[in-house]
Amino acid sequence: MNKPLRRIAIFCGLLIMALMIRDNWLQYVRADELNAHKYNRRVQIERFAHERGNIITADGQPMTASKETSGSDYKFKRTWNNGTLWSPVTGYNSQAFDSSQLENIEDKILSGNDDRLFFDRTLSMFTGEKKQGGNVVTTLNSAAQKAAFEGLGDKKGAVAAIDPRTGAILALASTPSYDPSVFAGNTKADSDARQKLLQDKDKPMLNRALRETYPPGSTFKVVTASAALENGLYSSIDEPTRSPLPYTLPQSTTPLKNEGSIPCENANLKVALQWSCNTVFGKISDDLGNEKMIKEANKFGFNDEVFTPVRADASVYPKDNRPQNAMAGIGQASNRATPLQMAMVAAAVANDGKLMKPYMVDQLQAPNLDVLSKTQPEKMSQPLSAANAQKVQALMENVVTDGTGKKGAIDGVTVGGKTGTAQHGLNNSEKPYAWFISYAKTDQGSPVAVAVVVEDGDANRDDITGGGLAAPIAKAVMKAVLKK
Amino acid sequence: MSVVTNTTTIGAIDAPSRRNTELALLVFAVAIPVFAYANVGLAMTDKLPSGMLGYGLGLGLLAGVSHLVVRKFAPYADPLLLPLATLLNGLGLVLIWRLDQSPRLIQRAKGLFGAFHPDAPKQLLYTALGIALFIAVLMLLKDHRILQRYTYISMAAALFLLILPMFFPAVNGAKIWISIPGLGTIQPGEFAKIIIAVFFSGYLMVKRDALALASRRFMGLYLPRGRDLGPILVVWGISILILVFETDLGTSLLFFGLFVVMLYVATERTSWIVFGLLMSAAGAVAVASFEPHVQSRVNAWLDPFACYKTDKTGACEQIGQAIMSFGSGGTLGTGLGQGNSDLIGFAANADFILSTVGEELGLAGMMAILLIYGLIVERGVRTALAARDPFGKLLAIGLSGAFALQVFVVAGGVMGLIPLTGMTMPFLAQGGSSVIANWALIGILIRISDTARRPAPAPAPSPDAEMTQVVRP
C-alpha cells in the first residue's frame, strides 16, 4: 500500500504548495495593487489615522487644524480656522469626499506618508513618537487675504494678488465662498451640507480666482499697449497713434464705440489708456494682427494652464478673424482671462517686463519643522523689455493719478492700474463685470500686483465700473501688503 | 533480520522514543504564542496584557499534561504532532483574543446583537475540552485496531451526524450546524470527518481485493465491475445530497475527496481517481447550476470585487475584503494588533482568521502557518507509511488526507483560490466543534504512530520473508 501512500503524500504537498503560490501571488505580486485598491478602506483609514499637518500662511498662521473624532474608522478630521476665508487656497479634505487643491496635491506630506518623511518615520518607530503629518507653508499673506475677502464682502467676485518680484501668491479670494469643515466628516449631515453647496446656484465651491475665466475688458488694453511697444508700432507713449474717430471695425460696418465723448481721435498711448479709448486699442490690435497679438498674450501666460501647484484654468486669447481680433484687443469678443492671469499681467509690467511663475507653496516641512523642500522663484517669460515695461508703467501710473483709476491711489505710494468694465452675454444684455488690475511700487521694486473682478448682478448697471467697484478692493489689498 | 527490515516499514526497529524532543518543541510551542500575546497587548494598548500570566500558564499546563500522558500511554508516538497542534492552537487563541480587542468588531456586535461577548475565554475552554478528549483517546484507545470492530456502527453514526444539520435552520446560508438550546451550536461535520474515516478504513480493508482485482482493463484504466461501483456511487450520492440540502461545498468536497483518496490507497488503482474527479466535477457543476447559495459563492470567487460595483452598502464584501486584507499585509505584515483585518466583520475570527494572519504577520507568517499545517499532514502520512497493519495505514492516511483537504478548502477559499466554503481552519479558527474534533484526530494519529514506531514485539519474520530467504552453503 506504500506506493499510493507516497503518491498521496505528493498530492498533499501539491495542495499546500498551491496555497503557498496563491499566497505569494496575493501578498507579494499583487500586494501594492491590493493595498491601494479603490475599495480598500485601509487607504482612507490610514489617511485619517494620524494628526494631519497644517497649511500655514507666510506669516505663520495656520489656516487649518486637525481634530480627533470618535465613532468611526477615521480617527482625525480636518478643521479650518476660518474656512470660508481660506477654502480658495486649501481646497477641502473630507473623510467621505476626498480632497481638492493643496489638500489633495500635498496630501502625502500632510498625511505623513511622503517618502521624504521616511527617515522621520523610521526614527519615530524607535522613539515611540506618534506618526504625524508635515506642514505646507504657503506664500499667502493673511492680512492681504482678509482685505481681499472683506473687500469683496457679499458681492460675487475674486481677487488674486502676486508679489511681482518672485511670483509668490499673496492673496487668493473668491466669493461667495464655503467652509470646507461642514463636510469634512463622513456623516449624513456632512453629505447633506455638501449637496447643498453643490446645488447652490451661486456656486460657492467654484474657485473664481483660478478656475473661472471672465472677459478681461479694458484691463486687457495693458497687454495691447505692450504688444504695440514690443512690436515697434510706436516708439514712444507720447507718439500719436494715428487712429480715427469714429472707428469702424475692419471688414464690417459696425462702429467701435467709446464710453462717452472722450478725447480719443489720434490720441497718444498715454491719453488713450488714461481715458480707456476702445477705438485706439481696437485699431492697434487690428494693425498688429491676430498672430502678433496671440504671441504677446501668450508671453503674458495666456492660452496655457498655470500650476501654482493648484491648477489655474488657461486664459484664452483666441485665433480669430479681423473684426473679432480688433474686439479681442480691448478685452472683448472671445478673449477670456482668470483673475490670476490679469494679476500676472500687472505683475509682469511692475517687475520691469519679467514675468515670474506664480506659486503658492513656499516650503514643505517635516513634523519637526525641518524643511523638506523650498520653492525657488522661477522666471516664466519676458513679455516686455525693461525699457518698454517702464513705458507701460508710466501709462498705468497715469491712469491712477489722472484717469479712470483714481480710486486705486494710495497716499505716498506709486500705484499703477487699469480699470475694466467687461460686457458679456448676448448683445451685452447681462450685467457687466467690473475689473481693476494694479501694482504698487516702493524703492525695493514692486511688492504687490493685484487683479480684482466683481460680477455684481445686483448693482445698477451704470455703477458697475472697474474704478467704482473693484479699485477700492485692490487698494485695500495693496495697503495690507505694504502695511500702510 | 536485515531482510525483514528491508521489506517492512521505515524506522520500525529500535526507534528512539523522542519524548524529550517533543518536550523541547513544546516549550517553543507554548513560548511563541505567549510572546505573540504580549505583542498584541503592547501594540494595541501599550502595555502587557493583564491575562498574560494566566494564559501562559494555562496553555503551558495543557501542553504539559498532554505531554505526560503521551509519555505514559504512547511513548513511541511521533514527536512533532503534539507541539505543532499546540502551537497552532495557541496562536489561534492569540488571534481570537486580538480580534476580541477590535473596537470595530465590538461595535459591530453591539449593533447587530445588542451585546458583545469575547470569544477567547470560550475558545480556551474548548481547547481544554479538546485536550481532555485527546487524553481520553490516548488513555482509552490502547490500540487503534479496536476501532475496526465498530466499522458499521461508525457508518451509521457518521451518516446520522451528516444528515442531522438538515433538520436545523441554515446559519448564514449553510446548513452545517445543529443548535442545542442552552449548549450552543455544534458543527457535526467536524466529528463525522473522523468517524467516517474509521468506517472507510474498516470497509476498504475488507473489500480492497475485490475492488482492486475484479476489473477489466480498458484504455489503460482498470474499470471496476458494475457491482463494485456501488459503494463509490453511494458515497458520491450522499456528498451530492449534502451539497444540495446543506448547501455546503466544503463538507461535500471533503467527504468525497476523503473516500477517493482512501479508495485509491486501498486498491492502488488510478482509475478510481479518474472516476472520482469526473464524478465530483459533474456533481459540483450540476448543483452549482441551480443552487443559488453555491452560485453566489462561485460568482464571488470569479470576481471578488463585483459586488462592490452593484452593492454600495458592502454587504457581500467578505471575499474581497479578505483578499485586500492579504494584499495589505505584504511581505512582513503590519504586526500583530496593528492591521485592519477586522474590516471583514463577519466571521473575522472564524472562517476568515487566516486573513488576520496574512495582514498582521504578512507573507512570512502565512508561509510559516501553511508549513506547520503541511508538517502535520506530512507526519500523518509518515505514520501511515510506518503503520504495520492495513487498517492503521488507511485510517492514518484518511485522517491526514481529510486534514490536508480541509486546510486546502478553507485556506484556498479565503485566499480566493477556490470558491469559499463554510469550514474553519483546524486549531486556528474560533469554534468549539472544530478544535475538539481536531484534538481527537491528533490523538488517533499519535496512537497509530505509537503503534507503528514501537519496536517490533518479537522478531516474527513474515512468511513472505521466509520463502525468499537465500540459503547459503
Image: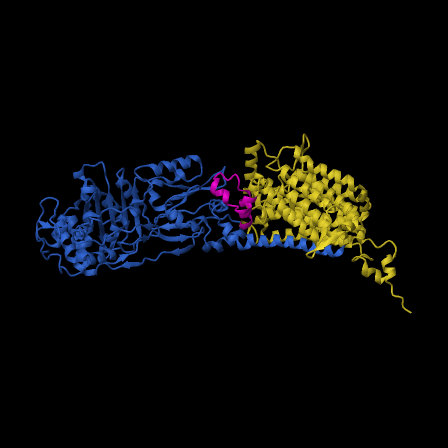
| Closer-to-camera residue (A50/B191) | B191
> Residue A464: percent from the left, percent from the top?
19, 40
Residue B331 included in the magenta stretch of the image: no
Which shade is chain B? yellow
Position of residue A72 in the picture relative to residue A322 (left or right): right
- Answer whether residue B61 is visible to the viewer in this image: no
Q: Residue furthest right?
A: B473
- Rendering quarter of residue B108: top right
Q: Which chain is blue?
A: A
Position of residue B337 in the picture relative to residue A327 (left or right): right
- Answer whether residue B149 is visible to the viewer in this image: yes
- Rendering quarter of residue B165: top right
- Rendering quarter of residue B197: top right
> Residue A16: percent from the left, percent from the top?
64, 53
> Where does the magenta region start and end?
B298-327
How many dots with numbers? 0
| Closer-to-camera residue (B349/B332) | B349
The residue that appears at 8% across and 50% down in the rendered structure is: A245
